[in-house]
């Protein structure tokens, strides 16, 4: 149909998604930066912390959306199949969505915890160590549900997950090598493990979106 | 890989949801196969052939390079 041809092109949808993401991210980042300084007017929120908190907000917001979708089996069916869906979502489909929501929520919480912990327990080493033990435990819980998500997923979802992971690794490895070489030659500033993690998570979300959009339904 | 999945499904008046339940995969998998975004595994291809009562070669056509 004329006039709607561009909407089916993958570049149109990716561009739209990226613009929406950038606008949302910028808004989130600004709000999070303000929240970070609340009660600590002199606090300096570094870029990695603000990015991590924005990602956390994105993950938790996505969780709420996923749970809302999964709360109605026909709504979930229409999301998965399109407007023509006439069969409610199956138990497996609801379970898969619920696991995705849980994994995403835990990812968001895990990204935020180190930032708040560093501020709350700045003066107490022992409390920071206990706090870290709690984070490690929560990470183990998230890993458990990540494995559960893999096990309940079918071949297509597993392929999507594997492709996203492989692309993230390939691109991230290249970027890491270049930065590490530049740092070693003192032409780039040293970065912390936290900086690297946050950039990797950002890359993972971007690559995941790219992979998902390319396999989205086309009418 | 080109396939006749959508045509065969339409002939039987099955939705993607119904076909996905018959094959034990997600609707996303059915949609991705129909739109040629994903090639099924051998196991799934055999299940499809058995479900539609035809050899795999009649269901799928490899792309010529």
Image: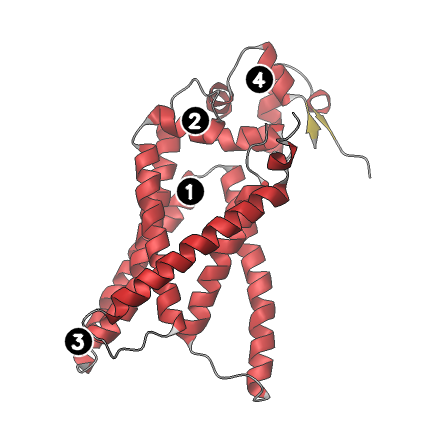
Q: Where residue A99 sits in the image (x, y, percent)?
A: 34, 43
Q: Which residue is mark 1?
A: A151
Residue ID at (31%, 38%):
A67
Task: Please tell me whether mark 4 sits on a helix, a strand or a loop.
Answer: helix
Give the labeled residue for mark 4. Answer: B51
How far is mark 1 from mark 2, CA to CA?
24 Å
Q: What subunit carries mark 2?
A: A
Quarter of the image containing the N terminus of chain A? top right
Q: Which mark's residue is nearer the viewer, 2 or 4?
A: 2
Residue A48 x, y percent position in the rendering: 40, 70
Q: Are marks 4 and 3 on the same chain?
A: no
Task: Please determine whether, in this image, residue A112 is positioned above or below residue A184.
Answer: above
Q: Nearer the viewer, mark 3 or mark 1?
A: 3
Residue behind mark 3: A127
* Disc 2 target residue: A78
Q: Do we see residue A197 in this rendering? A: yes
Q: Who comes first in sequence, dot 3 or dot 1?
A: 3
- Measured in 3D between alpha carbons, the distance from the residue under mark 1 to the one under mark 4, in whole angstroms, is 25 Å
Q: Are marks 1 and 4 in contact (CB under 8 Å)?
A: no
Residue at point 17%, 79% (across, down): A126
Q: Is residue B19 above or below residue B63?
A: above
| Left or right of A99 on screen, residue A12 | right
Q: Mark 2 to mark 4: distance in Å?
A: 25 Å
Q: Which picture quadrant has residue B51?
A: top right
Residue furthest right as drawn: B65
Per the image, label 1 sits on a secondary structure element best described as: helix
Is the residue at mark 1 from the same chain as the one at mark 4?
no
């Amino acid at each position: 149909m004329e006039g709607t041809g561009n909407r089916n092109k993958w570049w149109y949808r990716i561009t739209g998604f990226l613009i929406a993401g950038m606008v949302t991210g910028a808004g989130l980042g600004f709000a999070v930066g303000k929240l970070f300084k609340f009660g600590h007017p002199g606090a300096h929120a570094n870029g990695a912390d603000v990015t991590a908190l924005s990602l956390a907000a994105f993950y938790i917001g996505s969780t709420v959306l996923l749970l809302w979708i999964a709360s109605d089996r026909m709504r979930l069916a229409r999301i998965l199949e399109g407007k023509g869906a006439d069969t409610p979502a199956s138990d497996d489909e609801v379970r898969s969505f619920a696991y995705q929501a849980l994994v995403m929520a835990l990812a968001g919480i895990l990204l935020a915890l180190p930032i708040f912990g560093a501020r709350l327990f700045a003066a107490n080493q022992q409390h920071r160590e206990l706090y870290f033990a709690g984070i490690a435990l929560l990470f183990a819980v998230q890993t458990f549900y990540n494995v559960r998500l893999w096990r309940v997923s079918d071949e297509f979802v597993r392929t999507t997950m594997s492709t996203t992971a492989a692309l993230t690794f390939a691109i991230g490895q290249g970027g890491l090598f270049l930065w590490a070489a530049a740092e070693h030659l003192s032409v780039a500033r040293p970065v912390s493990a936290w900086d690297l993690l946050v950039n990797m998570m950002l890359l993972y979300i971007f690559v995941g979106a790219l992979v998902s959009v390319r396999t989205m339904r086309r009418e | 890989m080109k396939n006749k999945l959508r045509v065969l499904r339409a002939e039987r008046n099955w939705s993607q949801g119904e076909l996905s339940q018959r094959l034990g995969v997600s609707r996303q998998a059915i949609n991705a196969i129909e739109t040629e975004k994903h090639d099924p595994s051998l196991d799934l291809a055999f299940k499809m052939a058995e479900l539609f009562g035809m050899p795999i070669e009649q269901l799928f056509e490899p792309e010529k390079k």
